[in-house]
Image (spheres, rainbow, N blue to C red):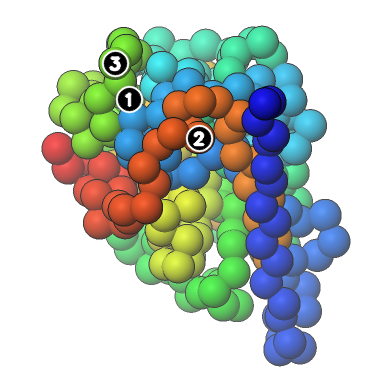
């Protein structure tokens, strides 16, 4: 009996008039698989990047076999491998986990004072109309430093993500121009995607980047795209169908996202 691909659509109804702009028509975050499935070592997806482009021109994720970090900007998807090399992802490549949207900012702010990553996140929080909806975040400009990581390509049998990140590579970038791109999601999303801020970086010359662990901004433009719809497409693979996803891993996700081994 063939298995069927399922899609979950989550829509948050906003009744407060001050939030009327949040979640304008078409502002949907599309995601393939779940962060919990990735945590359990499901690194083979059945979704191509060619198909992913139909759902967004901006976002982040990874490639099959957990082969590096992915960042999408202006319709181009880049792979940052664990050796630090950056490549444009071909349409035929597949992803086990990615989140994308068609980025159309609802708010734009220029920041000209130095802030560390945690201070930057706190500042962005003050710009949000609610902590309970979804946001795509783009921060572009000059950075005093950016600390990133990338995870090496895995081989079967795949280890859980907590084991895979023990072999991650770290990159220390200084005095660099580039873009951080990603999402800020509510805490209740912790088993579907990473709760809080999840950002990837790519340098302006497209020669370095990765998953952001720390940063210091100097002169940047912050753009925020509000969204209240999340479309989750679940993999049509035996690994996903047979995985035990009943146990939650919100705390472990935070450790992995923050670079803790």
Classify 12 as above or below 86.
below
Instruction: Decide if residue 116 is on the left or right side of residue 130.
Output: left
Residue depicted at 46% across the width and 14% down the height: 86
User: Most extreme residue toward the right, as rendered?
Assistant: 25
The local secondary structure at tag 2 comes to: helix
Instruction: Decide if residue 109 is on the left or right side of residue 260.
Output: right
Residue depicted at 59% across the width and 59% down the height: 135
Percent across and percent down for residue 189 are 47, 61
In front: 224, or 3? 3
Q: Is residue 80 visible?
A: no
In front: 42, or 2? 2
The first of marks 2 and 1 along the sequence is: 1
The local secondary structure at tag 3 comes to: loop
Q: Give the residue number, with chain letter if any, for mark 3.
A: 157
The first of marks 1 and 3 along the sequence is: 1
Q: Which mark is residue 246?
A: none
The first of marks 2 and 3 along the sequence is: 3
Instruction: Decide if residue 76 is on the left or right side of residue 220.
Output: right
Question: Quick one: label 3, few (<14), some, or many (20+) residues within 10 Å?
Answer: few
Instruction: Decide if residue 14 is on the left or right side of residue 241.
Output: right
Residue depicted at 41% across the width and 58% down the height: 190
Percent across and percent down for residue 30 are 67, 45
Q: Give the residue number, with chain letter if any, for mark 1.
A: 150
Q: Which mark is residue 241?
A: 2
Locate the N terminus by quadrant: top right
The local secondary structure at tag 1 comes to: strand
């Amino acid at each position: 009996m063939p298995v069927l691909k399922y899609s979950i659509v989550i829509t948050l109804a906003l009744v407060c008039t001050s939030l009327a702009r949040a979640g304008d028509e078409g502002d949907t975050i599309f995601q393939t698989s779940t962060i919990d499935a990735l945590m359990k070592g499901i690194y083979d997806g059945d979704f191509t990047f060619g198909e992913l482009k139909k759902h967004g021109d901006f976002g982040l994720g990874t490639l099959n076999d957990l082969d590096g970090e992915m960042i999408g900007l202006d319709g181009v998807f880049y792979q940052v491998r664990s050796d630090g090399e950056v490549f444009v992802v071909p349409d035929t490549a597949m992803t086990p986990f990615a989140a994308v949207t068609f980025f159309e900012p609802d708010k734009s702010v220029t920041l000209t004072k130095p802030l560390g990553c945690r201070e930057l996140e706190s500042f962005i929080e003050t710009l949000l109309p609610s902590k309970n909806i979804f946001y795509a975040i783009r921060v572009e400009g000059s950075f005093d430093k950016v600390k990133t990581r990338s995870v090496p390509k895995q081989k079967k049998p795949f280890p859980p993500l907590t084991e895979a990140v023990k072999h991650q590579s770290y990159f220390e970038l200084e005095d660099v121009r580039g873009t951080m791109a990603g999402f800020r999601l509510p805490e209740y999303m912790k088993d579907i995607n990473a709760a809080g801020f999840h950002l990837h970086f790519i340098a302006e010359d497209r020669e370095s980047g990765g998953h952001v662990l720390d940063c210091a901004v100097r002169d940047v433009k912050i753009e925020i795209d509000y969204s209240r719809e999340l479309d989750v497409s679940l993999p049509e693979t035996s690994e996903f169908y047979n995985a035990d996803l009943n146990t939650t891993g919100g705390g472990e996700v935070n450790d992995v996202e923050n670079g803790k081994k």
